[in-house]
Amino acid sequence: MKKSILIKNGNIVNENKTFKGDVLIENDIIKQISTTIAPKENIEVIDAKGKYIIPGFIDDQVHFREPGLTHKGNIASESRAAAAGGITTFIEQPNTVPQAITQELLEDKFEIASKSSYVNYSFMFGGTNTNLEELLKTDPKKVAGIKLFLGSSTGNMLVDDVEVLENIFSSTKMIISLHCEDEGTIRKNTAKFKEKFGDDIPIKYHPIIRSEEACYISSSKAIELAKKTGARIHIFHVSTAKETNLFRNDIPIEEKQITAEVCVHHLWFSEKDYEEKGTHIKWNPAVKTEKDRQGLWEAFLDDRIDVLATDHAPHTLDEKTNVYTKAPSGGPLVQHALIAILEKVKEGVISIEKAVEKMSHNPAKLFQIEKRGFIKEGYFADLVVIDPKKSQTVSKDNILYKCGWSPFEGTTFSSTITHTFVNGNLIYNNGVFNDDIKGKRLTFNR
């Protein structure tokens, strides 16, 4: 039997309130929450005075690269970095090698995670133009959802047959997560710039190639089809202000059939950063204008955008330093996303209560995850303790990603994550990991 843990004197952030109190953990769960809990014999006490206690960040979009691309990262290395970053649960995408486009291949990934993931996990089933029958076998109680690439796909995962797309939308009640960029528009834009520059297109043109138009065409069509078919869709990594007007904020998230996600890099960077950061901030969809960034913040704060994610997608430095057409899109973010948002809390851009809603509560509601995402008695003890007055600077020496670099290198953040609990286990404690404990497979209330 695990030793009970009492976290005392913390500022507990939960359901739009912050209050000073204690949290008692017994085995996997939160046993008690109170303004004061007396320590008893054989209970480990952690003093969180002056610190925040928040529910663990649930990241609904990561690419941990296993199987098949493990020179970039693997489930063990990237979930370890996630634990240090206060992410206690991830949902990983199907574009590995092989792709998770059969139930057998999907279960292979769950098997890997059961032996190596530091935090809780689920995986998405990948839809293609030809695997509807297999897709419909996906168990809604044991799998996070379906992922469709309507742009920027790998292998054969581009779903570009309108009839197939309508069949998928009409046939499943599971959440369908979408990457929305119009491939025809992007191909046309790329050809124009390749004619002028060859393969070495200046990175500043990336948001013009993968343009506002490309994003809006794809997401607006997907939403139109969802309304026609009644599909439950979730649009990943919204990157333009224009797209935010496609979403509503007049009903609770639990009643929405169409939801949206924004990623930390689209809230942090803008086109002005390409000159300094180059291909290190090359993502699909692209980081766009300051006006877009501002529009995303407005939609994030007024609830047109429902959740925050990382789209963590590591590549090696050698890969990223290629010329434009050969440099892959994506970057590692799970270790620093939470503290990046906390920087915006310090600046007064967002309240810590709102940040927790977007990082923890809403992903749990959106995916109907069982007993996670909140600090509630009877819920799994997935908790993060944060020291808001202990600053840190991101450097090669403290980056945990297998790829060894970060787009935040050189950035000084005001906050530090001191403790991360996963299912009541202290996985991360001031830089020290518990390598013996593994996370759990998510289950869903569906």
Image: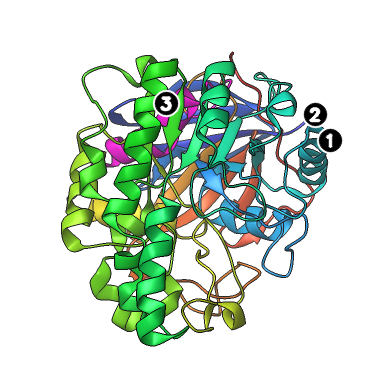
- Residue at coordinates 46% horizontally, 22% vertically from top-left? 232
Image coordinates of residue 277 in percent, x first then y, are 37, 79
Nearest-to-viewer mark from 1 and 2: 1
- Residue at coordinates 54% horizontally, 70% vertically from top-left? 328
Question: In what element is the residue under mark 3?
Answer: loop
The circle drawn on residue 229 is none
- Residue at coordinates 75% horizontally, 43% vertically from top-left? 438
Q: Which residue is mark 3?
A: 36
The residues tagged by marks 2 and 3 sit, at their Cα atoms, a distance apart of 25 Å
Instruction: Say what amino acid the circle numbered 3 marks.
Output: Thr
**Is the Cβ of the residue at disc 1 closer than 8 Å to that at disc 2?**
no
Is 187 or 181 nearer to us in this picture? 187
Label 2: how many Cα within 10 Å (few below 14, some 14–19, many 20+):
few
**Vertical placement of 339 versus 204: above or below?**
above
Q: Which residue is mark 1?
A: 104
Q: Which residue is mark 2?
A: 1
Instruction: Say what amino acid the circle numbered 2 marks.
Output: Met
Question: In what element is the residue under mark 2?
Answer: loop
Q: Which residues are magenta?
A: 348-373
